[in-house]
Image: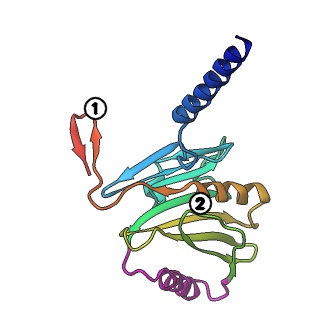
Amino acid sequence: MRATNRNLAAALALVGLFAAALLRPPAIFGGLLVYGEGFAFTVAEPANWKSDIQSAARWGANIIFYPQGESPSAPGSIVIRIGVFDKTEEDTSKDLDADMNQYRSKYPKVAFKDIDGIKAHYKAWPKLFYLPKTFYEYVTYLNPGPEHRQLISISMNKTGTPATADELRAYQVVIQSFVLVSANGFKVYDAYKGQVRN
């Protein structure tokens, strides 16, 4: 009888673990769902940072992040931006080269440096654009593959000094947690309006 109770207890424990695994959200789900016309993505909000969709358009982005208690428009503030754009071609390195050339024409003394250690779900092109003691723009392009028509730009802008280790960790959280949900034809049902949105 004792063996049966132990087997029953073990079986119940396994059922409990299985149920907990089913109820837990997938590890790749970032916690925030952002969508627009023809796309949707999930992304995590870094600890001690605030996400903002309302102000994002002013930054040419779909969502921005900035440290809690700060304003994204305050002088010297640091902002992480995510923008989803239509691809013009599959070779993402050409997009990065074009951006670097634009910076060279606007800031002749601009320098560029590879960013090491970036981890992402998609092929990534990370680069630091900087003018010492003036601005530091960390740029990472993500290409989710030829089956998607979107190109993702995740950037972090800081004036005056390079990003700190904590700021770079927040940037990495955003990049690593980013997952494109949509494919062509993505639709969202807006329960408040009772209609399907693109």
Quadrant location of residue 88?
A: bottom left
Rendered residue at 37%/69% (across/down): 147
**Residue 19's x, y, as percent?**
54, 29
Relative vertical location of residue 166 with respect to residue 191 in this rendering, above or below: below
Q: Is residue 68 left or right of residue 96?
A: right
For mark 2, give the secondary structure: helix
Q: Inspect this view and state whether residue 127 appears.
A: yes
User: In whole angstroms, how far apart are the C-alphas of marks 2 and 1?
Assistant: 31 Å
Amino acid residing under circle 2 = Ile
Q: How many marks?
A: 2
Q: Is residue 96 magenta?
A: yes
Q: Determine contact: label 2, label 1, CB under 8 Å.
A: no
State the image coordinates of residue 139 (x, y, percent, origin top left).
59, 70
* Disc on res. 175: 2
| Residue at screen point 53% across, 86% down | 97
Quarter the N terminus occupies: top right
